[in-house]
Amino acid sequence: MGSKQEIILLGAGGHCKSCIEVISGISQYSIMGIIDKDGSSTKHILGYDVMGTDKDLESLLLRCSDALVTVGQIKSPEIRISLFERAKSLGFSFPVISSKHSYISKSARIGEGTILLNHSLINTSVKVDANCIINTKALIEHDARIGSHCHVSTGAIINGGVIVEDRCFIGSGAIIHEGITVGADSIISAGQVIRDDVPSNSVVK
């Protein structure tokens, strides 16, 4: 069995803890350490060191070439996008991270830097683009499309043929009916049932 590939985590909040749990349960990667924002007093998370700030990314690339954005995304994806684009421009690679308890259809396509947390389900012919969070027990059904920089929260159900455009947040337990389009930069609050198309830049609550 070969040695694990090292990975750096970008962001030291609560979502980072969930990412650590997933990564520590799979065989492909080991965590070198965590990068946090300037001024943070956090030194360790779940036994892993906070190695520096995003200002240190360029020097860290000499030691480790893989990264994952581990900042959460509730209202705005701006911090996740900024970290992803900066690290990518420096030359970092962003692997797909999937929990050993997740399911991904062989016909699905998952974009770089996306993480699938425990018991998430990605069914046939689904496409998920880059830098997304597919959270615990989220279900994405056949032929659905999730754009880049989206967060599909815990227990959300994305039914067949749904299109969720870039930079959207789908709250916990939300249900998107089949064939619906959720326009870019929209927020669907927890528990909402969406039966009609949602225009871009909408907040449904």
Image (tube, helix red, strand yellow):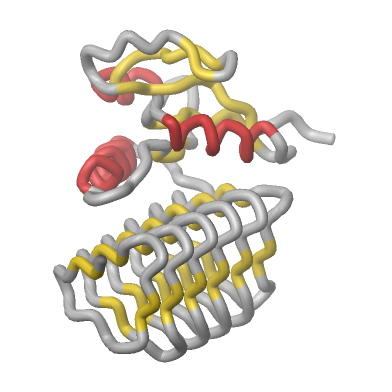
81 or 102: nearer the eye?
102
Question: Which residue lies at the image location 37% right of the left edge and 71% below the top edge?
Answer: 192
**Relative height, residue 133 to residue 22 (above, below):** below
x, y (%) of residue 34?
44, 22
Question: Which residue lies at the image location 22% right of the left edge and 17% below the top edge?
Answer: 38
x, y (%) of residue 2?
78, 34
Number of marks in the rendered image? 0
x, y (%) of residue 59?
34, 18
Where is residue 15, by image quadrant? Answer: top left
Q: Quadrant of the N terminus?
A: top right
**Relative height, residue 166 to residue 145 (above, below):** above
150 or 3: nearer the eye?
150
**Relative height, residue 121 to residue 95 (above, below):** below
x, y (%) of residue 25?
71, 37
What is the residue that sits farthest to the right in this orientation? 1
Q: Quadrant of the C terminus?
A: bottom left
**Relative height, residue 131 to residue 161 (above, below):** above
Question: Which residue lies at the image location 55% right of the left edge and 16% below the top edge?
Answer: 48
Question: Which residue lies at the image location 24% right of the left edge and 80% below the top edge?
Answer: 198
Left or right relative to 187: residue 175: right
